[in-house]
Structures are given as structure tokens and as C-alpha cells.
Image: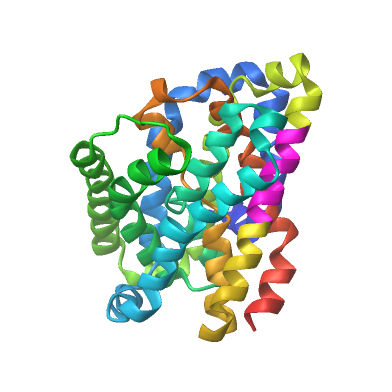
Amino acid sequence: MTALAWMGKHATALLAAGVFVGLALPDLATMARPLLVPSIVVMLVFSLLRLQPAAIVEAARSPGRVLPVVGFVLLVSPAIGWAGVSAFDLEGMFGIGVAVAVVVWTASPPLVSVTALATILRLDGALSLMVMTLGGLLMPLTLPPLILGLIGVDLHIGVGELMLRLTGMLALAGCIAAVIRAVAGRARIQRYSDALDGAFVLVMLVFAVAVMDGVTQAAIADPVKVAGMIALVFAVSLILQGLGFLLFLPAGRRTATTVALIAGNRNMAIVLGAAPAAFHPDAFLYLAVLQFPIYLLPALLRPVYRRLST
């Protein structure tokens, strides 16, 4: 457990370094590709395992805190994304694939790993879990009509089928976490919290390596375009984090900082995976370069999150 505990205590730094593994070892990224979906489920298990049930119940009993954040993530955010795409003519700069990807990303639910990231950063893990769960369940109802209405792309996603997939994934992870919690006990889980964070870091690294499949080749073929996309994903994430913080600042600094983290970390992978034929290949390249802000910003902004949340 010592190695895992060490990784847990240095989680943000390790994630920042690990994002480059998939780029440096493209063959390893190709080998890890089949582990994408399993790693998402495992990350969700770790996120659920670390949270106290009482905190989840308390957050669920406070719809006034949760629902406005969900509305911002699923409804307001894509409108902001569409406005930015139009104002800066991202379709002209990067092509239709990237322009669509930006709007889809802003309409996507939070990452399944956002709860664990919030816990590691000492933010409101219960709030992030409720927003991630409710956002994931409602997204099939909000995203397809929004994308069709804003950018005219029919994703051909069956609402019922996608909701069943999301619900099934959440239920599976919840059952696994409940069994582990029952067998291990709350005290033992708390005692090994750093080790659990370390195991979570390992799974995130697996996901990062797998999703980087093909990025190295694309960077070699067109380095200017890939560099521009990397700058774009950082800008979009930081802008939404800043807006989320400012909009929810009246609810308290810790809540506002948690919303900022949620707003800048979205689960676009589940959308692209549900309807791959509907998207341009550049959308998948956008998904890959998204891992840079996801893995680097928690380390770079950790002092900022701490200062803003207190």
C-alpha cells in the first residue's frame, strides 16, 4: 500500500506527468484502447467509494444547490459554447469537426472522475457527485435536441437506449462500491484513503494512455493544427471554469470553486462513443487533446482552487 499511498498524496503531479505517456508511447496507447470503457466504470467506483453516504443524502435533500448547477452544465453551457464557436468562427479556423466538438463538449455531463478530483482537491465531493449523476441521467434528453437545434447535427442517439446505458453504468459502479464499503467498512476505507487515491490515479493514467491513440501521428502530420487545438481546449475549459465560479459565487466560495471544476471537466467520450458515425474524425482528435487540460489543470490550478474555496 505504500506505493499507492505515495501516488495518492502526489496525485495531481502524477496525472500531469502521465498525460504524456500516451504521446511518447503510441504503440502502448493502441494496446490500451480496449480499456477505455472499463476504466470509466472503475473511476466511477472509486468516486462513489470515497464519499460518505450521509454527505450524498444531504446533497440530495438540497435541490436548490444541485439543480441550478445541472442547469448551468446542460443548458447554459452549450449556449455559451455555440456563441463562442460563432463569435470566433471556429469552423473557419479548425473545420466543422472541431466546431461541433466544442458545442458537444459544452453540452456533455461532468466526467465520472470529477467527484474523485473534487475529493483530492478538498472541494465539495457530494455536490459534484449529485451533479455528475443527475447530469448523466438527463443528458440524453437535453443534448440531442440542443445539438440539432444549435448546429444542425442529428446524432441519431436513441434517448431510451442511451439513458439505459448511463443508468446501467452508474448502477453497476454503485453496486460494486456498496459491496466494497460493506466488506471493508468505513473506518478501513478512511484509513487507506491515500491508497485509494493512488489506485484512482493509476486508472486515470490507463484512460489517458488509451485515449491518446492516434494523437502522436496527427501531431506529426499537422503540428500547427494540433497545437491550435490544444490551446483551444485549455481556453474553453478555463473560460467555463471562470464563468461557473463567478455565477455561483453568491452560493459560497467552496460551492463556486466546485462548480468551476465541474464546468471545466466534461464526459464527451460517452457521447462520441454512442454515435461515432455522426462525428467528423477531428471530433475524436479534439476528445484526445482534451486530456491535456483534464490532467494538467488540477495540478496547475491546485493552489488557485485552495485559495478560491476558502
Classify 231 as above or below 115.
above
Classify 291 as above or below 181.
above
Magenta region, main secondary structure:
helix
Q: Position of residue 42 (x, y in %)?
A: 39, 44
Residue with the most extreme right position? 224
Q: Nearer the viewer, residue 101 or 198?
A: 101
When asked about the image quadrant of residue 148, the answer is top left
Q: Is residue 21 visible?
A: yes
Report the residue at 59% width, 25% height from top: 282
Q: Nearer the viewer, residue 127 or 149?
A: 149
Classify 20 as above or below 181.
above
Task: Tell whether 306 sits left or right of 127.
Answer: right
Q: Nearer the viewer, residue 200 or 26?
A: 26
> Split into 4 quadrants, where in the image is the C terminus?
bottom right
Report the residue at 58% width, 81% height from top: 249
Report the residue at 29% width, 33% height from top: 157
Range of magenta residues: 228-238
Q: Would residue 229 be counted in the magenta stretch?
A: yes
Q: Would residue 61 be counted in the magenta stretch?
A: no
Report the residue at 42% width, 58% height from top: 75
